[in-house]
């Protein structure tokens, strides 16, 4: 609608604003603006190498030559029936196309076979529910049975509060399967993606034989707000970034997403008996 | 046991009248010697640990304590262990395994200490290792929640062959206040949160999270009762072939 003075009405202005497509992507780390159409295939910032958060399926497509999913049907038990929680679950299922917050299966990376799990941060913040724990536990068990290494990409806000103490027990449950996989002499690569915090950090994320991360990923146990509230301390800006963890000795390496596939296939080949496989 | 509101149980678990971990350890164990240090960085007094004997059988006891006659609440962050405390616990567990001594953990913690230094020194990593390596210990491992069993900081010492809880104790994913804040954005609804969180021993035993409820101990006679139960369980586990014990322990945790 155009006013008598020839200028658009406020409603018209708002409509035009809303019609402008959201064309820019802003790097949350360095603030660099990227024209969405120009974002590279790895979805990384060209300035600071931050990797924008990926859904589970996108990560698998980027990494695997082929991938056979496992346990897609596993989902939260009916006993968790709080309507608010069910609504969150439904929304998460729609957004991710998954029943639960982790996609797992047997895949190959440049021909190297591995059991691969990817947590999806969009699924109630990648929280660790009973079904999430079950899928990860079964992945380790399948890997033990098939004599395969495990690569697990974590992205999680920690325990799933809506499932209470049973969520806490998932830390122990998955650890049990990590222990058996490890006792079989098999390789576990933990790959910490942005963000990995809380109970996931305090269990399987930190149990890898090798622990990798991506530039600037947030990794920690206690959340910033918990620290601020509980002990009135103001943490420095970068205190839980991958670079800080590397400096303090808790990561083997920070790998740019562009190098993820090549690095993982190199590591896998080194655990397959050496040069003859390379 | 009389029926109490869940939040009253929270208050009793946190009460100053709760038996002190140091008292409990010294009443249970003869010739107890406290052992210090994580051999890497420091010594966290929130983790009270050492060796002693239970009816003549050497044991390693590891507790997380709040303030008592020796340390103030501030010294031990109200029972919140730091990474060097967890590292000390892990060191002493491995030592117990070497000398084939059973391990008993006594837990009274609102949770692992949340601060910047703790993050820098691997709070998450150390808890993850206590869960992973503790679960694989080749010696009997009995965990007891004495007061508060708060989140990952409690789970770190609660992956034994059995987990017991005192009558006035709680075990939960976070405090009722924290739960109300996160899920309802209102910390004043803690009482209500306690009701839905199923954190009392009666709720926990139904879900198989704990195996046994221990009557509250105050007097020496009551502590003797508790000690007798610990000793019986320890002997039962010691009589079991190692592989069978480990298999049962693994099955316990895989079931969740």
Image: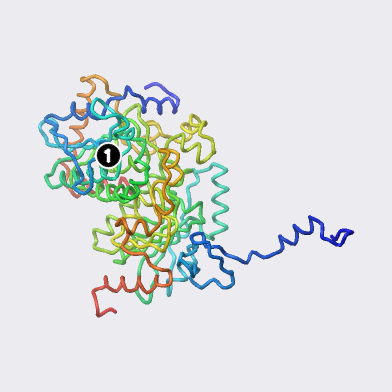
**In the displayed structure, does residue A219 sit left or right of residue A208?**
right
Image spot of residue A100 (x, y percent): 48, 55
Image quadrant of residue A187? bottom left
Image height of A31 relative to B164, above or below = below
Q: Which is nearer the eye, B63 or A40?
A: A40
Label 1 marks a residue whose chain is B
Q: Residue at x 28, y 25 (%)?
A: B19
Left or right of B28: which side holds B5? Answer: right
Q: Quadrant of the N terminus of chain A?
A: bottom right
State the SS at label 1: strand
Model colouring: rainbow
Q: Position of residue B211 (x, y in %)?
A: 31, 36
Q: Is residue A73 above or below residue B202?
A: below
Number of numbered markers: 1
| Left-right relation of B84 to A81 | left
Tell me which residue sits at (50%, 36%) in the image.
B180
- Crowding at label 1, few (<14), some or many (≥20) Cα neighbours within 10 Å? some
User: Would you name the residue on which mark 1 appears?
Assistant: B162
**Residue drawn 35% across and 60% down?**
A190
Q: Quadrant of the C terminus of chain A?
A: bottom left
């Amino acid at each position: 609608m155009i006013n008598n003075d020839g200028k658009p009405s406020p409603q018209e202005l708002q409509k035009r604003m809303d019609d402008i497509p959201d064309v820019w992507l802003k790097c949350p780390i360095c603030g660099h603006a990227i024209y969405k159409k120009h974002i590279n295939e790895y979805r990384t910032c060209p300035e600071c190498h931050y990797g924008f958060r990926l859904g589970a399926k996108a990560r698998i497509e980027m990494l695997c030559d082929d991938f056979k999913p496992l346990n897609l049907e596993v989902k939260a038990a009916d006993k968790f029936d709080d309507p608010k929680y069910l609504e969150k679950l439904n929304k998460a299922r729609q957004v991710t196309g998954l029943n639960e917050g982790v996609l797992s299966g047997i895949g190959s990376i440049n021909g190297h076979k591995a059991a691969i799990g990817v947590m999806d941060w969009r699924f109630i913040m990648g929280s660790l529910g009973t079904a999430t724990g079950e899928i990860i536990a079964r992945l380790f068990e399948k890997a033990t049975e098939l004599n395969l290494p495990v690569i697990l990409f974590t992205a999680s806000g920690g325990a799933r509060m809506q499932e209470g103490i049973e969520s806490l027990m998932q830390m122990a449950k998955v650890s049990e399967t990590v222990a058996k996989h490890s006792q079989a002499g098999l390789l576990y690569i933990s790959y910490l993606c942005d963000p990995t915090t809380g109970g996931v950090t305090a269990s399987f994320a930190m149990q890898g034989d090798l622990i990798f991360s991506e530039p600037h990923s947030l990794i920690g146990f206690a959340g910033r707000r918990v620290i601020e509230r509980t002990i009135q301390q103001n943490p420095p800006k970068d205190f839980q970034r991958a670079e800080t963890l590397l400096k303090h000795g808790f990561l083997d390496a920070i790998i740019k997403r562009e190098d993820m596939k090549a690095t993982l296939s190199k590591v896998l080949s080194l655990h397959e008996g050496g040069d003859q496989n390379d | 046991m009389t029926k109490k509101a869940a939040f009253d149980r929270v208050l009793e678990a946190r009460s100053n009248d709760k038996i002190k971990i140091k008292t409990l350890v010294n009443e249970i164990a003869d010739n107890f010697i406290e052992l210090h240090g994580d051999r890497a960085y420091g010594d966290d007094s929130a983790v009270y640990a050492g060796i002693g004997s239970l009816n003549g059988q050497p044991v390693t006891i590891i507790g997380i304590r709040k303030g008592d006659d020796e340390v103030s609440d501030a010294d031990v962050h109200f029972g919140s262990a730091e990474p060097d405390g967890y590292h000390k616990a892990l060191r002493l567990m491995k030592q117990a395994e070497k000398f084939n001594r059973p391990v008993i953990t006594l837990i009274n913690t609102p949770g692992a200490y949340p601060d910047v230094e703790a993050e820098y020194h691997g709070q998450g990593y150390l808890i993850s290792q206590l869960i992973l390596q503790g679960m694989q210990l080749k010696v009997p491992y009995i965990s007891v929640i004495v007061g508060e069993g708060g989140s990952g900081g409690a789970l770190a010492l609660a992956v034994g062959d059995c987990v017991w809880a005192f009558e006035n104790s709680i075990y939960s994913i976070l405090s009722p206040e924290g739960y109300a804040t996160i899920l309802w954005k209102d910390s004043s609804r803690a009482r209500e949160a306690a009701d839905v969180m199923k954190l009392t021993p009666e709720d926990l035993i139904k879900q198989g999270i704990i195996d046994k409820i221990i009557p509250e101990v105050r007097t020496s006679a009551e502590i003797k009762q508790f000690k007798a139960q610990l000793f019986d369980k320890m002997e039962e586990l010691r009589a079991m072939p190692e592989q069978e014990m480990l298999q049962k322990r693994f099955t316990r945790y895989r079931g969740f």
